[in-house]
Amino acid sequence: MAGEFFWAGMNAIFVQSRSMIAVTCAIIEHKGKVLVAQRSTAMDLPLQWEFPGGKLQEGETEEACVVREIKEELQLRIAVTHRLPDCIYAYPTKTIRLIPFVCQLLEGHLHLAEHAQVQWLSPHQLPPLNWCEADVEVVEHYLQFVR
């Protein structure tokens, strides 16, 4: 079986050969709450929750990607404060390397371009949501980070 090993935090993960998509996501903090987004019915994984973000473009830094994606998707300006460990998840048709950043909200008027809805939640309210599988480990890492 062909494949490669990738490091996610302290764990080596074996991924079968197929395209791996690098995706950044923002855990946006503001006044003790965190912004979470519900995917629309037109998106893959409809109505599941995620930290918003998007695909890394060629030649783009990961930090620039997350800032750009949040501006495009939500019309918010953010500042990256911390990077959490990457999380790799193999869906049936693709493998995602999710690159999470803890960010602070700087300014903007929230506008939904892609998502069904967003909510500002306290960290303890995050685990019960119906998360996209790739985001589940990000939630765990974030809760460890805030402890």
Image (tube, grey):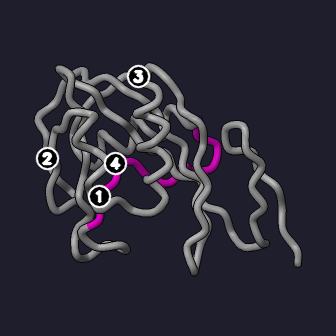
The kind of residue on which mark 3 rests is Arg
Marks 4 and 1: which is nearer the front? 1
- The residues colored magenta run 48-61
Marks 4/2: CA distance? 13 Å
Q: Which residue is mark 4?
A: 52
Pointer 1 with pointer 3, Cβ within 8 A: no
Dot 1 or dot 3: first in sequence order is 1
Which residue is depicted at the point 46% across and 26% down?
145
Indicate left or right for 100 with 16 as reference: left
Residue located 41% across and 29% down the image: 102
CA separation, marks 2 and 3? Answer: 31 Å
Circles 2 and 1: CB distance less than 8 Å?
A: no
Q: Nearer the viewer, residue 28 or 74?
A: 28
Task: Please name the residue that numbered disc 2 is placed on.
Answer: 111
Badge 3 or badge 4: first in the primary sequence: 4
Callout 2 amino acid = His
Mark 2 and mark 3 lie on one chain; the one further toward the N terminus is 2
Mark-to-mark CA distance, 4 and 1: 9 Å
Disc number for residue 147: 3
Q: How many other residues sit within 10 Å of disc 2, few (<14), some (14-19) or many (≥20)?
A: some
Front position among marks 4 and 2 = 4
Residue linked to disc 1? 49
